[in-house]
């Protein structure tokens, strides 16, 4: 299962930062002509876990897996993930990962969820991402919700806006909405 880093990332922030630093130092100090997998660091679980990584330009993609996982299978999984990111972001870079972290997580969840690989067909993953994007656009996104609410209030054709709303025992006083109308 490939969920070890996610469970560790729900621990205190200081430990998270230590894990990131340790992983960074373990991967960065390796020569480019050495294999792309190594034993996990002390904070990750030592020999019980492996770090499997790929280096693309200035980006490192690191998966932490238990020692029974296939290194080549995980390298292939990283390749699928990176190619999918590349397709979704049109030549992915650091800024895409930083400013669109929610989309990156969504893409990763299309590939892996709960430690289990769900999908490795990049075309299927991209199709799901595009379907999600279409859905978000048709809904106008969450950021458009306040504007839609104000628009709905403006479009209510009431002769007078009610000041009190009574529903059973519940009495609601409506604030002055003249600034929105």
Image (spheres, grey):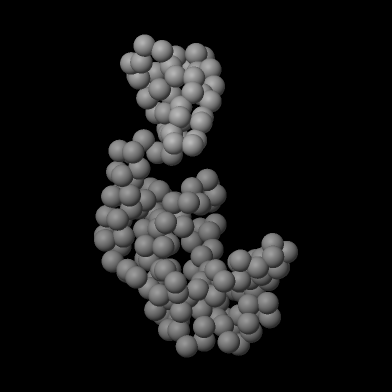
Asked whether, in this view, residue 116 is left or right of residue 175, the answer is left
Q: Is residue 36 visible?
A: no
Instruction: Farthest residue to the right: give it.
Output: 14
Asked whether 34 or 2 is in front, the reply is 2
Relative to 164, residue 67 above or below: below
Image position, residue 96 (x, y; %): 49, 48
Residue plotted at (31% across, 60% down): 125
Question: Could one spot residue 145 in this view of the protein?
Answer: yes
Q: Quadrant of residue 58?
A: bottom right
- Residue 64 in which image quadrant: bottom right
Left or right placement of residue 24 versus residue 59 in this view:
right
> Compared with residue 85, is residue 18 higher up or lower down, i.e. above or below?
below
Name the residue at 27% across, 55% down: 127
171 over 23 or under it: above or below: above
Number of numbered discs on residues:
0
Residue 40 screen position, x and y as percent:
61, 80
- What residue is shown at x 50% (from left), y 73% (from top)? 3
Q: Looking at this rendering, what residue extends furthest in the top direction?
A: 159
Q: Split into 4 quadrants, where in the image is the C terminus?
A: top left
Direction from residue 2 to residue 86 in the image, left or right: left
Q: Which of 20 and 141 lies nearest the eye of the viewer?
A: 141
Q: Percent from the top left, x then y, of residue 10? A: 61, 66
Residue at image point 58% right, 87% down: 48
């Amino acid at each position: 299962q490939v969920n070890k880093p996610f469970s560790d990332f729900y621990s205190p922030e200081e430990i998270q930062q230590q894990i990131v630093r340790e992983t960074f130092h373990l991967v960065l100090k390796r020569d480019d002509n050495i294999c792309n997998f190594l034993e996990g660091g002390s904070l990750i679980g030592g020999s019980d876990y492996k770090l499997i990584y790929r280096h693309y330009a200035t980006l490192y993609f690191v998966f932490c897996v238990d020692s029974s996982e296939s290194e080549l299978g995980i390298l292939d999984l990283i390749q699928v993930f990176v190619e999918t990111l590349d397709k979704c972001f049109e030549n992915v870079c650091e800024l895409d990962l930083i400013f669109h972290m929610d989309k990156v997580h969504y893409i990763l969840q299309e590939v892996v969820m709960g430690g289990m690989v769900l999908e490795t067909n990049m075309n299927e993953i991209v199709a799901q991402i595009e379907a999600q994007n279409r859905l978000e656009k048709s809904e106008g996104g969450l950021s458009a919700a306040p504007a839609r609410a104000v628009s709905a209030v403006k479009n209510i054709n009431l002769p007078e806006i009610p000041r009190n709303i009574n529903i059973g025992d519940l009495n609601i006083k409506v604030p002055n909405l003249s600034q929105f109308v």
